[in-house]
Each structure stands twice: as C-alpha cells, then as structure tokens.
Image (tube, rainbow, N blue to C red):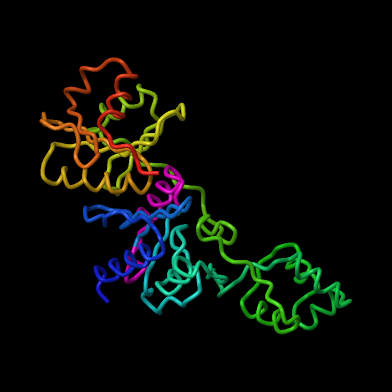
Amino acid sequence: MSRTALVGNITAMLEDAGFLVSERCSVRPKSFDLAARRGEDLVLLKILGNIDALTGETGAEMRRLGDYLSATPIVIGLRTRNEDLEPGVVYFRHGVPVFNPDTAYDLFIEEVPPLIYAAPGGLYVSIDGDLLADEREERGWSLGRLATELGVSRRTVSKYEDGMNASIEVAIQLEELFNEPFSNPVSVFEGAEDVRDADPIPEGPAVDPDDEQVLSTLTNAGFDVHPTNRSPFKAISEDSGGRERAVLTGHSPFTPSAEKRARLMSSIGRVTETRSIYFTTDTVKRESVDGTAIVSCEELASIDDPDRIREMIRERAAEPEA
C-alpha cells in the first residue's frame, strides 16, 4: 500500500470515529501528517510504511508539539525493516507510541485500547497488582505457591503485586491459573506514559535569525514563543498570562507556498483550537487567509503597544471551533 493511500485510509477511519481531522500536511519538512480531535483527545499523527523512517529529530519535535498543544503524538505504521508490526501491540520510537492500522481501528473505532507493548527483550503487559494480590489471597495461596506455579521467584511475584510489568507469557499463565485477565490497557491518549520509560522532552531548536525580530516582538507582547524546525509553522506562541489561545506562527515572503502554509495552519488551528498568524516580509493587501491572520512585518514594526498586537491577532484570526 502506498503511503498516500495509507494516509487516506487513516483519515477516513478517524472521521468515521467522530474525529475532526485537519488537512494533510503536504509541506516539507513536516513532523506530523494529520491533527485530529475528538472531545478532549487531540492527537498528532505521523503515518509511515516503515516506522524506522522516523528520525530522532522528528520524534523530538512531535513530543515538543504534543507538550505545547496538550496533544498525544502517535505514529501509525506497517512494519520495521525486519518484520510487520503486530496487531494489538504498542511500540515506541524516540519516545513516541507506534502501532499498526488494525490497532488504530480497535482504539479509534471500537474504543478498545491495546494491552501489550514492546520493549527490549520482548512483549509485556501492565499487571493490575492489587487485583492479583486479592485473587491470590482469595485462593489462600502464598507468594511462594504462586511463584512455583509461574516458574519465577517469590520476589518476582511480590514485584508483580507491587506494580511491576510482566512478560506476555506470564500474563497468559496468570489468566489460565485464575481464569481472569490481570492486564491493564496501555493509555495511548496519555502518551502511554504508564509503560514507557522515555527521556525528558528534548529542548527546542534555536530561533532562526530570520525570524528573530518577529518572535521577539511576540515575546515582548507577553507570549512564550516556542520555535519549531519541522512543522508547517515557525513557532507556537503561548500567552504567558493564560488569557489568549495559543497561536501558530508563520513568517516568510507571501509566496504561493506561504499562502498554502497559511491555509494549512488554519486547518490545523481548527483542530488544535488555536489561532494562527502569518507575518509577511512584503506588503499584502489582505488581512487573512482562511482564518489565518496576515500581518506584514512593516505593520508589526509600527506597533509599539503589546495590547494592540494581541487585539490585531484576535481581530484577524478566526476564532477556533469549540
């Protein structure tokens, strides 16, 4: 299956599941392909045939964007270089949860989260330790008795009951012994933080010198500006006072490519519930493109009142959909 067809299939799946889905990010470089929201669940999706194509730089940017936008970065793919991705299993690349389209269908359409995750050494599940301890005590089994049945040490059983994750083989044994599942679902919409051991979110890139004046002006207007390097916008600007919505921020000459980016920013903004603004290095006789505010750098330089900058963004940028 071509990547274009795969993106189309995932888009249709999300829409069937009741998600609002952005236009596909068709500009380069790009850290994600789609933004999608259903209620409080916002996801940034990268869709790949071979998940090994996800670079560390892209993974870091996806995680940063997830942090700035309160979104979950997810990769949906078909295979690695060596094997197909197993259904029902969550993998990880550069700290980002990864799974195949069948698992996506179960999660998004059936609302059945996966139970298994891959980690060095094999496949694992998160054990409900309290339930295991209750069932063991109900049967009158000692830690040693259960350890013998499982072929592990007494200390290992104690760790399972304290919340240590178990191999899928042990999870199957427990289910057969007690005729009851003990596996907790993997919380994908929370980034699967309950099972992954991820590094802290990497620091953001330095400001491009060409963007420095624009971004510093936004900083002076009370925004915390987070530069990006693999997104259809140059930065995400958050209101440090919490009074305004975050703003997707672009900056370049107003070429046809820039207009395309502005339209894409509007589409992403509707999903992420952010505003968007594009600063142009030339004069443009229009104030918005599909809801993305258009402001020339010359106009911006003439404004010395931070409140006026905020007011201009509110006036020209479309209000995000609820």
Q: Which quadrant of the view contains residue 147?
A: bottom right
Q: Is residue 82 left or right of residue 4?
A: right
Residue at 50% over, 57% down: 189
Residue 19 versus residue 188: which sits nearer the camera? Answer: 19
Quadrant occupied by the C terminus: top left
Q: Is residue 255 left or right of residue 3?
A: left
Quadrant occupied by the N terminus: bottom left
Q: In the rendering, at what x and y percent does residue 11 appear?
A: 32, 64
Q: In the rendering, at what x and y percent does residue 26 appear?
A: 22, 56
| Total tally of numbered discs in the picture | 0
Stretch in magenta: 47-71
Q: Is residue 25 magenta?
A: no
Q: Which quadrant of the view contains residue 143?
A: bottom right
Residue 317 versus residue 171: which sits nearer the camera? Answer: 317
Q: In the rendering, at what x and y percent does residue 244 appear?
A: 40, 30
Q: Which quadrant of the view contains residue 159?
A: bottom right
Q: Is residue 58 magenta?
A: yes
Residue at 73% over, 66% down: 129
Q: Please, what is the dominant secondary structure of the magenta stretch?
A: helix
Residue 78 versus residue 290: which sits nearer the camera? Answer: 290
Residue at 14% over, 32% down: 286
Q: Is residue 159 above or below residue 43?
A: below
Farthest top residue in view: 304
Q: In the rendering, at what x and y percent does residue 256 appear?
A: 11, 45
